Image (cartoon, rainbow, N blue to C red):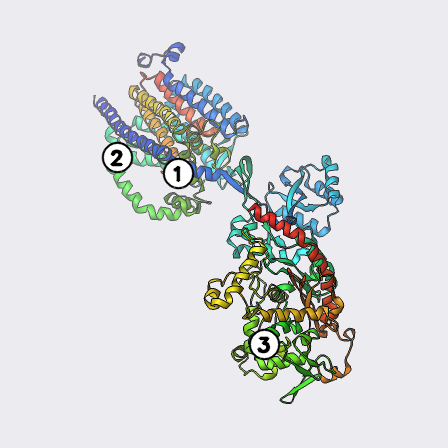
């Protein structure tokens, strides 16, 4: 009985306890359901996003870079289709065999072969290896021919930068090459757009206009698995290609400039004297920017880098030269403007003048005799300019020169390598050298030597502003959308000069930005221009032998020969021929000119480093170039009209 | 004699009629769902896992039906032997077992790699049920009885924890404890041992393996190492959460087929199911488990013998633990400890153990009027 009692109690206990457990189970199941509800219903959006983030991955595609056009809409930096060879190791059955075959077919060098193998071992098997970035057509067709034997190799069509005019635009456009760490770090747009292998501008306009040229990435969306392998492509968005940038340059002229400068270190700049458009701007020696596209090889690079003629320097903007006698128009103008001299002022040149025990020589030992402004400019008489510089003083000379654009950047921020040059005055010397100005320095400044340093483009601008009658112009190399016609500009200049006499100061302020007058009396400009005309077109002019008699092409200019080394007494007595002097000690040859003389439209400056003398080396180049510039004028004007009516 | 009077043997057809068909249908349904899930883990193809799982399910299901015809007395009679054999297997495993991923849990029986710790989950219940069957109510709380019960419980736990396999040893402990509790042990002992456990916890943690410590820390904050230890929990929660109300659709669980989900065949099979079938599907699956557990408890309630009753209650509760521990784990409610979801997860030993449990329950149902002396 007792046992049964216990038995009943035992059953009661177990049932009671089971009930308690049952209740606990109910609670736990409710908790799990609540958890499921919170994850799947309440927070569903959050987890759905996280799941998509897991499985979707975007691949940015290389953007298509904007093109450069010249004034006539020829492509001067474009995009070329290139053939590449890609291999995805995962899709290759026998990687070793494929590589050996490819090595034979493409004749890959051992170094490159090793590099490819290294890359293969470094990356995941489904990541693309670029075997060749740029197959020649021959290689491409060969690969296609053997394709049945090359399982896994993929001939791919891609785009790459191309400079069709090779050397002709190197310094203006610069070049592109694969973006470096530094490029990515310094430019946010590059950072945002970067994909492996992206090419960005390294120098020149390619660098300046990087943000406009770069374009936007195309985007491919893929579903990927946990190991990052692409499973399927979901969608594809096209990127926008970069902006097209049009330059004011004329490729025909640019090409000829390049030819004319072959074998020499120097530069040519050509400018429209009303619009300020740079028609040509070439620095020599140049190099082929296409070499940099797929990584330049060491030999080519060393050749460029170690060339004593410095091909990497853009001499039009970064080359600093003493202007030599090309500075004389400024000295003459300044003296006239400041009423130090008039056109009849005469000096007797005996070949040298003495001052405080120092002798200052004229380039002509025997002297020029009695010279006035015109004949002094014509024959580039140094004594005359020593004399007027002495009377003028360096500070007033600087005022005039600065007005005409010397010592200031011509294209502002367009090129990051443009130099300012230097026009000295007494204050400058005191501040920078801590010494007082001496009169002898004024004399040599008067013939463009001494501290004075200018870039060829500055000289070109100075000449242009003399040629257009002394009005400020705004040099540019990028075509402006709402540019003015030449007629409009001339009208504005006319108005400005008429108003000059009435209420010059007030209106001068109002029109400061609009082709402001750089002179006090337009007659002075005229005198300087006439003197420059004489220098080229009259007998005994320094560039007489480079003249063109046809009035259509007739131009006026001024030669310059700037010393790179102080001439010693011994040198003077030896009077060596240019060719007998070591290259690095030869004088720089300069020439500035504008034309056609009757109705000027273009100005140019030519600098040949260590060329000997302006009249023998630089001026003849101008003669060869000028005909082409004038011949191209008609078509240029027609294009301009079309452009303006288009807008 | 008395034996015949009390234990009139039912005929084969009576037995067949006495089967719990609701339970049977639920098990078959679970088998079908598990087969489909396994098919999904194989990426919509019948590959190794689905083939192996389906064949194991079928073999063990037929085995279960066959074993259901055994009289409940048979199980009572062999309970201790079963326990001892499994215990022997455990010792064997820790001495000569097959090593895999840092732990030694399997013994090689040539045709199958057996995981004895899974069998121990069922053996501990059957052994303790037999043990308490005999013990009189007034002796349950005596020192001697408690000591023997604890030895029965602690021996396998120690063996499993040193394999090391924390998940299974916890489940064995829970299964054993629930039987001891049901047998009527005084609640104060549970309170005492709970306090003792809390006090010893810092020392216990010192004994944990580094990877187990990491799991606890990861559970407390999965984001502390999202690519390492926390990866499983984070990815599992993403999969479940992204399922939404109705799920991403059969074979469309991106987390699973893109391989973000770890161990999707085994411990995380519920995650895959919840991702593909959503909240409603998960509720349905949970409901099947609840019905199974309810049916088992009901069989316990109608069983006349104490052994069958205790076993059914114990096994019903143990199943509840397996299911809730696994689900809580994949839902981020508990730290990750290896614990399969019965029938759903891939794994022969677990399937075998679960099916043996069902066979005993079914036998209890068929023989529910049977008393055991």
Please give the chain letter of the residue carrying mark 1.
A
Most foreground residue, A453 or B223? A453
Q: CA distance from mark 2 to mark 1?
A: 55 Å
Which residue is label 1 attached to?
A46
* Residue A458 percent location from the top left of the image: 60, 66
Which residue is label 2 attached to?
B142
Identify the residue at horizontal 39%, vertical 47% (top origin): B207
Q: Nearer the viewer, mark 3 or mark 2?
A: 3
Which residue is label 3 attached to?
A335
Instruction: Name above or below for residue B214 compared with residue A185.
Output: above
Q: Nearer the viewer, mark 3 or mark 1?
A: 3
* Residue A489 percent location from the top left of the image: 56, 57
Whether residue A174 is visible here, answered yes or no, is: no
Instruction: Name above or below for residue B16 compared with residue A494.
Output: above
Q: Nearer the viewer, mark 2 or mark 1?
A: 1
Please give the chain letter of the residue carrying mark 2.
B
Instruction: Name above or below for residue A182 compared with residue B271.
Output: below
Instruction: Name above or below for residue A158 compared with residue A564.
Output: above
Identify the residue at horizontal 63%, vertical 49% (top origin): A639
Identify the residue at horizontal 52%, vertical 63% (top origin): A496
- Image quadrant in which you'd find residue A446: bottom right
The verdict on a common chain for dots 3 and 2 is: no
- Image quadrant in which you'd find residue B330: top left
Most foreground residue, B354 or A223? A223
The verdict on a common chain for dots 3 and 1 is: yes
Label 3 vs 1, first from the N-terminus: 1
Q: CA distance from mark 3 to mark 2?
A: 128 Å
């Amino acid at each position: 009985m007792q046992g049964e009692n216990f038995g009943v109690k035992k059953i009661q206990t177990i049932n009671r306890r089971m009930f308690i457990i049952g209740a606990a189970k109910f609670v736990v199941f409710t908790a799990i359901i609540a958890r499921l509800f919170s994850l799947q219903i309440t927070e569903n959006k959050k987890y759905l996003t996280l799941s998509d983030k897991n499985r979707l991955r975007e691949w940015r595609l290389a953007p298509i870079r904007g093109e450069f056009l010249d004034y006539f809409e020829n492509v001067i930096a474009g995009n070329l289709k290139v053939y590449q060879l890609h291999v995805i190791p995962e899709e290759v059955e026998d990687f070793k065999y494929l590589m050996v075959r490819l090595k034979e077919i493409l004749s890959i060098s051992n170094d490159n072969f090793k590099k490819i193998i290294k890359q293969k071992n470094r990356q995941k098997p489904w990541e693309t290896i670029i075997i060749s970035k740029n197959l020649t057509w021959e290689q491409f067709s060969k690969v296609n021919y053997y394709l049945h034997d090359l399982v896994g190799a993929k001939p791919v069509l891609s785009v790459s930068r191309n400079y069709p005019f090779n050397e002709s635009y190197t310094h203006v456009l610069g070049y592109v090459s694969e973006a470096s760490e530094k490029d990515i770090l310094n430019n946010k747009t590059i950072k945002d757009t970067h994909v492996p292998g992206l090419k960005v501008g390294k120098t020149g306009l390619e660098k300046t206009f990087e943000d406009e040229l770069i374009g936007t990435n195309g985007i491919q969306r893929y579903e990927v698995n946990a190991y990052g392998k692409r499973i399927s492509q979901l969608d594809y968005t096209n990127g926008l290609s970069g902006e097209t940038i049009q330059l004011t340059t004329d490729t025909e002229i640019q090409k000829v400039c390049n030819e004319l400068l072959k074998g020499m270190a120097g530069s040519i700049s050509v400018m429209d004297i009303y619009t300020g458009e740079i028609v040509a701007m070439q620095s020599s020696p140049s190099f082929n920017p296409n070499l940099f596209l797929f990584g330049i090889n060491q030999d080519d690079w060393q050749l460029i880098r170690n060339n004593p003629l410095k091909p990497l320097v853009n001499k039009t903007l970064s080359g600093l030269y003493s202007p030599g006698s090309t500075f004389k128009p400024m000295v003459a103008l300044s003296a006239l403007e400041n009423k130090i001299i008039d056109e009849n002022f005469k000096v007797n040149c005996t070949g040298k003048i003495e001052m405080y025990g120092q002798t200052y020589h004229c380039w002509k030992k025997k002297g020029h005799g009695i010279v006035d402004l015109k004949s002094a400019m014509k024959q580039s008489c140094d004594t005359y300019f020593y004399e007027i510089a002495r009377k003028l003083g360096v500070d007033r000379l600087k005022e005039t020169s600065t007005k005409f654009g010397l010592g200031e950047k011509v294209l502002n921020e367009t090129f990051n390598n443009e130099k300012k040059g230097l026009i000295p005055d007494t204050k400058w010397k005191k501040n920078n050298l801590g010494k007082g100005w001496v009169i002898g320095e004024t004399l040599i400044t008067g013939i463009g030597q001494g501290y004075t340093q200018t870039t060829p483009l500055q000289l070109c601008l100075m000449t242009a502003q003399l040629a257009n009658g002394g009005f400020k112009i705004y040099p540019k190399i990028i075509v402006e959308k709402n540019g003015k016609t030449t007629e409009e500009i001339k009208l504005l200049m006319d108005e400005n000069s008429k108003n000059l006499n009435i209420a010059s100061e007030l209106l001068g302020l109002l029109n400061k930005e609009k082709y402001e007058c750089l002179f006090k009396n337009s007659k002075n400009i005229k005198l300087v221009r006439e003197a420059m005309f004489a220098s080229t077109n009259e007998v005994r002019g320094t560039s007489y032998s480079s003249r063109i008699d046809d009035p259509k092409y007739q131009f006026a200019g001024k030669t310059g020969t700037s010393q790179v080394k102080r001439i010693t007494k011994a040198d003077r007595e030896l009077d060596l021929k240019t060719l007998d002097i070591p290259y690095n000690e030869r004088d720089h040859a300069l020439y500035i000119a504008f034309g056609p003389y009757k109705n000027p439209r273009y100005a140019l400056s030519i600098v040949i480093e260590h060329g000997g003398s302006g009249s023998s080396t630089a001026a003849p180049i101008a003669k060869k170039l000028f005909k082409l510039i004038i011949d191209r004028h008609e078509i240029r004007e027609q294009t301009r009209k079309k452009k303006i009516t288009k807008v | 004699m008395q034996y015949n009077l009390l234990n009139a043997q039912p005929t084969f057809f009576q037995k067949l009629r006495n089967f719990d068909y609701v339970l049977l249908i639920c098990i078959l349904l679970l088998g079908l769902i598990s087969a489909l899930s396994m098919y999904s883990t194989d990426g919509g193809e019948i590959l190794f896992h689905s083939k192996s799982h389906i064949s194991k399910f079928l073999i063990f299901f037929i085995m279960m039906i066959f074993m259901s015809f055994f009289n409940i007395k048979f199980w009572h009679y062999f309970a201790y032997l079963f326990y001892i054999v499994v215990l022997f297997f455990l010792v064997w495993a820790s001495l000569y077992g097959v090593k895999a991923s840092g732990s030694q849990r399997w013994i090689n029986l040539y045709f199958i790699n057996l995981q004895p710790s899974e069998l121990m989950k069922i053996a501990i219940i059957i052994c303790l049920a037999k043990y308490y069957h005999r013990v009189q109510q007034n002796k349950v709380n005596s020192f001697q009885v408690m000591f023997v019960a604890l030895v029965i419980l602690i021996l396998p736990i120690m063996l499993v924890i040193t394999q090391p396999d924390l998940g299974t040893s916890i489940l064995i402990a829970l299964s054993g404890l629930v039987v001891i509790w049901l047998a009527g042990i005084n609640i104060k002992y549970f309170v005492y041992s709970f306090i003792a456990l809390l006090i010893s916890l810092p020392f216990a943690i010192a004994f944990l393996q580094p990877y187990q410590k990491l799991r606890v820390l990861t559970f407390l904050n999965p984001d502390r190492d999202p690519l390492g230890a926390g990866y499983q929990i984070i990815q599992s929660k993403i999969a479940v959460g992204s399922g939404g109300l109705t799920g991403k659709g059969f074979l469309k669980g991106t987390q699973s087929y893109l391989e973000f989900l770890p161990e999707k065949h085994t411990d995380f099979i519920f995650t895959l199911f919840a991702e593909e079938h959503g909240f409603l599907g998960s509720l349905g699956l949970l409901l099947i488990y609840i019905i199974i557990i309810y049916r088992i408890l009901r069989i316990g309630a109608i069983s006349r013998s104490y052994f069958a009753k205790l076993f059914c209650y114990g096994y019903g509760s143990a199943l509840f633990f397996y299911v809730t521990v696994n689900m809580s784990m994949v839902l981020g409610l508990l730290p990750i400890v290896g614990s399969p979801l019965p029938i759903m997860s891939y794994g022969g030993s677990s399937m075998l153990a679960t099916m043996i449990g069902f066979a005993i329950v079914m036998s209890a149902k068929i023989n529910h009027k049977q008393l055991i002396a």
